[in-house]
Amino acid sequence: MLNIEKTLYSGNTLTTGGREGAGHSEDGRLDIKLSPPGAPGSGTNPEQLFAVCWSASFLAALRHACNARKVVFPAAAAIAAQVDLLHGEQGFFLQARISVSLPEIEPEIAHQLIEAAHQNCPYSKATRRNIDVSFTLN
């Protein structure tokens, strides 16, 4: 069991209509239409949202890893995240491919930073041993 000291933030949302609905945050900052993946429509889908959320959190974890090691975090650092919705014998499931760009950082150091970020990122922790995840360095 985790020993939680305090809650830093709670994201409160309400979604209606499932993959063809809409999502809204309690504070009004998020107001999105949803459309099923690959279907016509102007909305996004849960896989795209998960990919952008994970990549934003992972970038923050990379910055933290750089700061802890006194490595300058590149201004052009970027994450390309791909979250796949899959179907098999066991039903629906996800997999993720995360491509990390850390220009100006030697590849050996970059790989160490990626591993440190993967250990610290809340999204990585939430998915660990639950979905297949691969990382590449660009």
Image (spheres, grey):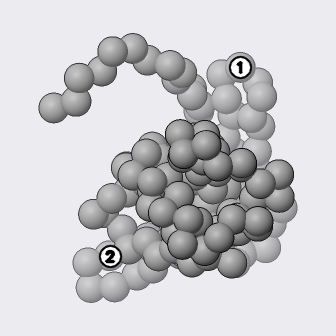
The residue closer to the viewer here, 11 or 106, is 106
| Drawn side of residue 81 relative to residue 2, left or right | right
Disc 2 vs disc 1: which is toward the camera?
Answer: 1
| Drawn side of residue 86 relative to residue 102, left or right | left
Q: Can residue 72 be seen in this view?
A: yes
Question: Where residue 106 sits: x, y (%)?
Answer: 65, 70
Mark closest to the chain's N terminus, 2 or 1: 1
Q: Is residue 34 above or below residue 36?
A: above
At 37% from the left and 57% from the top, the residue drawn is 127
Q: Is residue 36 visible?
A: no
Q: Which amino acid does label 1 sit on?
A: Asp
Q: What residue type is labelled 2?
A: Gly
* Mark carried by residue 121: none
The C terminus lies in quadrant: bottom right
* Mark carried by residue 27: 1
- Callout 1: 10 Å neighbours few (<14), some, many (20+)? few
Q: Is residue 29 above or below residue 19?
A: above
At 54% from the left and 72% from the top, the residue drawn is 108
At 16% from the left and 32% from the top, the residue drawn is 1
The single residue placed furthest to the bottom in the displayed view is: 89
Question: Where residue 93 sits: x, y (%)?
Answer: 39, 71
| Drawn side of residue 1 relative to residue 116, left or right | left
- Pointer 2: what residue? 91
The residue closer to the viewer here, 85 or 100, is 100
- Callout 2: 10 Å neighbours few (<14), some, many (20+)? few
Q: Is mark 2 on a helix, strand or loop?
A: strand
Image quarter of residue 48? bottom right
Real-space Cα separation, disc 2 to disc 1, in angstroms: 35 Å
Question: Where residue 5 sits: x, y (%)?
Answer: 33, 15
